Amino acid sequence: MTDIRTRQIRANGLTFTLDEAGEGDDVALFLHGFPESRRSWRRQLPFMADLGWRAVAVDMRGYGQSDRPSGKAAYTLDKLTADVGALFDVLGARRRLLVGHDWGAVVAWAAAIEQVRPLDGLIIMNVPHPAVFARHLRRTPSQLLKSWYVFFFQLPGLPELMTTTNGARVVERAFTQGVADPSIFSPEDLKVYRDNALTPGAMTAMINYYRANAAYLGGADRTMTRRIETPTLMIWGEKDAFLDVGLTEGYGPYVSDFTLHRLPSVSHWVQQEAAADVNRLMAAWLGDRLRA
C-alpha cells in the first residue's frame, strides 16, 4: 500500500500541513471535522492512492500543524471555502474530488454549492446539505437537542475551559463514547487529538468555526439552496449521536446526482470506525461515476 508523506504548502495566505499519498494531478482533497485533524483520514489516503488518486488530507486552518489566524472572523465560511479553492490550485489539480466529514463536509457542501472550483466528484460523510438541515431543524425538535453544543460553543471562554481541562479528556471521550469498539482509536490517535486541542489557541480556533458561522448553521443563508450538479456520494453512520438519520432524506431538489449509503451500527466517526466499508463504497462509486 502507498506510503503517506507529510509536508507543508502555502495557500490563501496561510501555511497548511498535509498528509499525501500517490502522485499526479487527479487530486482527492480530504477535509476533516471537529475536533479532528488530517489524521482522521489515515485509513483512506493509501487506499485512494492505490486507486490512482493523489490523496491529500490537510489540517484545516486553525487545526493541528496548520496556521491558526486569530479572531472568529478568520473562520467564516467564505474563507474556509477559499482555502479549498487555493489548495486545489497549489496542488495543481486537473481533476478534483472533494471529500469531507463533519465540519469538513460543511465546507465541502458550501464549496460545491458556490462552485469555488469545478468538481468532478463530491463525497460527504455524516453532515447534511444545509437546506436539508434547515428544514429538519424546523420540523424536528429532537435535532435541536442533539445540536446543543452548537449553542454552547457561542459562549465566550467556557467551552475552551471545559474541553481542555484534565488533559482534554473530553476530546478523547468524544471519540470513544458511542462507538461499538473504542479500540479503533489507538492511544497514539487519541494523544494526537488531545495534544492538538491543548496547543495554545487551538481550541478557540476550532470553536470559532461554530461562532463565525452560527447563522449559516441555523439555515439563514438562502443562497445555499442552489442545485449541485456534481455527482455526490453520501456515506452515513446511522448511530450518529449528533445528527438524526432523517437528515439523509430529501435531496432531490438540491443535488442532481445523489447516491446514499447508510451504515447501521456505525457512529458519527464513520471513516475511522468503518474504514473498510467506507473505502469499499467510495471505490465502487468512483468506478461507476469517474475513474482516475
Image: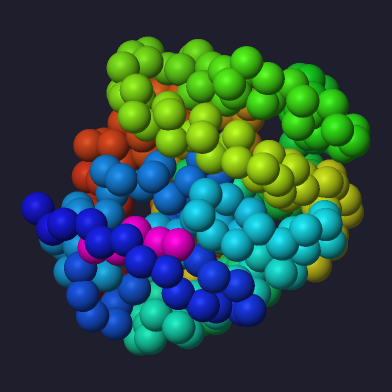
Q: Residue at x 51, y 77 (%)?
A: 10
Horizontal arrangement in the rendering, residue 262 relative to residue 128 (left or right): left
Along the line of sight, the residue nearer the viewer: 200 or 19? 200
Image coordinates of residue 49 in percent, x first then y, are 20, 62
Q: Position of residue 144 (x, y in %)?
A: 80, 26
Task: Answer left or right for 194 relative to 151.
Answer: left
Judged by its main secondary structure, the magenta piece is strand
Q: State the image quarter where residue 148 is shown.
A: top right
At 59% across and 36% down in the image, what residue appears?
A: 197
Q: Residue 95: percent from the left, percent from the top?
A: 36, 80
- The residue nearer to you, when weighing 122 against 5, is 5
Q: Is residue 121 above or below residue 60?
A: below
- Coloured how? rainbow
Give percent across and percent down for residue 251: 60, 51
Seen from the viewer's position, the closer of residues 95 and 207 is: 207
Q: Which residues are magenta?
A: 17-21
Q: Is residue 13 left or right of residue 262?
A: right
> Residue 215: within the magenta?
no
> Which quadrant would the C terminus be assigned to in this image?
bottom left
